[in-house]
Amino acid sequence: MVLPREALSRRLFLQIAAATGVSFATGAQAQSTWPDHNIRLIIPYPAGGSTDVLARILAELMKDMFNQTFVIENRPGAGGNIGIAALTASAPDGYTIGAATVGHFAINQFLYKDMPYNPERDMIPATLTWELPNVFVVASDHVPAKSIAEFIAWAKQKTKTNFGSPGVGTSPHLSGVMFVNRTGIDAVHVPFRGAAQTIPAMLSGDVTFAIDNLASYIAQVQSGKMRALAVTSAQRWPTLPDVPTMAEAGQKDFVVTSWAAFVVPAGTPRPIIDRLAAAMKTLAADAELQKRFQVAGARCIASTPEEAIAFAGKERAMWKDVVALSGAKAE
C-alpha cells in the first residue's frame, strides 16, 4: 500500500535528520545552520514536463526535511541552457539549486556554438536524482513487427520510414540516430515539440517509430494502441516486465536514459553539497517514493558528487560522437 504524501514526508523527515545531521529545531539554533531561508530550485524546462514533475516531488519532500520552502522557478529555453546559465551565475551559497539533465552535462555543449556556461567548470552535481528510459514504440495499427529484429527486416523492405522525437538534440532524437546508423535502415528524423505532437502522428501512420521517454508513451502502450518493442534501460523496466531491453533485443551497447542531477554553482561549500547528497540517498532508498516515481515512468537514484561527475564524463564521450554523427546544430 502506498503511503499518503503527508505520511511519507513525515517518515522521511525523521530519516533525513538522522542521515544528514541537519538541525530541524526552531529558533536561534536553526538559524545558525544552512539552510536558514528559502531555497530557489531552477527547473530549466516548462511546467508540466517530466523534469518539472519529478523535481517538484523531491522539492515537496525536501521542504519538510530541511524545514525550508523550495521556491520553484521554471526557466525554459535554448535546450535548458537559459535556466542552467542562471544557476551558474548565482551565488555559491547553497540557496540556488538547479535540476540539470543529461543535455546540460553531455549534449548541449556539442550542439550549441555558444554556450553560456561550462558544464565541467561552472556547476557541481551534488547528486544524481532520477533516470527515465526511452522505449522503442510503433503504432499497432500500422507496423506489424513484434520485435526489434522483425522491425529491422520490415523497415528494410519499405521505401520510406521515419522516426519522431521531441526535438533536435534530445536523447530521443539521438537514440533514433544511433539505431538508424547501427541497423542500416533508411529513416528520416521528424522533430516535434513534444510527445503530445508525436503520438498523434504515429497513430495516424505518418511517423513509423519513436525511441522516446517511457513516461510519455506508457499509457499508449498499456492501451494497446502502441507496441513497445524494447526499452533502453540496462534492465527490464518494472512497469513493462515483458518488454526486452535493447541488449536482449539484439542491440548491444544501447543503454540510454534521460537522467538528471541536482546541481549547484561552482564554489558552493562541500558540507552543503554533502547534505544534499545525503538527503537524496535517503529518498532513493525509500520504496514508497520509488513507487511514486514508477508511476511517472522514472526511477529515483542518488550518488556522491564524484560518482555523478564520473557518470557525466562517460555519457559526454558517448553523446559527443552521436551528436557528430547526427550532424545536428542549434543556435
Image (cartoon, rainbow, N blue to C red):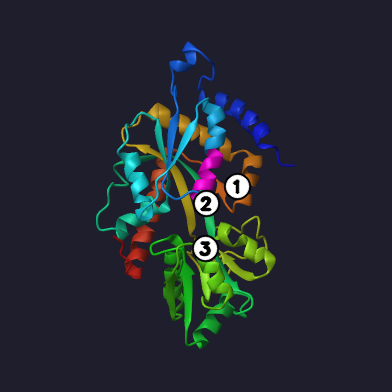
Q: Is residue 98 above or below residue 154?
A: above
Label 1, label 2: how many angstroms apart (C-alpha)?
10 Å
- Residue, disc 1: 293
**Span colored in magenta:** 49-58
Q: Quadrant of the C terminus?
A: bottom left
Q: Is residue 254 above or below residue 64?
A: below
Judging depth in this view, the residue of 98 and 240 nearest the camera is: 98
Three-letter amino acid code at the position of disc 3 = Ala
Q: Residue furthest top?
A: 28
Q: Secondary structure at mark 1?
A: helix
Judging depth in this view, the residue of 224 and 276 nearest the camera is: 224
Residue 270 x, y percent position in the rendering: 38, 29
In the image, is residue 202 part of the stretch drawn in magenta?
A: no
Q: Quadrant of the N terminus?
A: top right
N-terminal of the two: label 2 or label 3? 2
Three-letter amino acid code at the position of disc 1 = Phe
Q: Is residue 250 above or below residue 77?
A: below
N-terminal of the two: label 1 or label 3? 3
Q: Secondary structure at mark 3?
A: helix
Q: Is residue 207 visible?
A: yes
Q: Residues within 10 Å of mark 3 (few under 14, many from 20)?
A: some
- Residue, disc 2: 50
Camera-near label (1 vs 2) is: 2
Name the disc covering residue 195, or none.
3
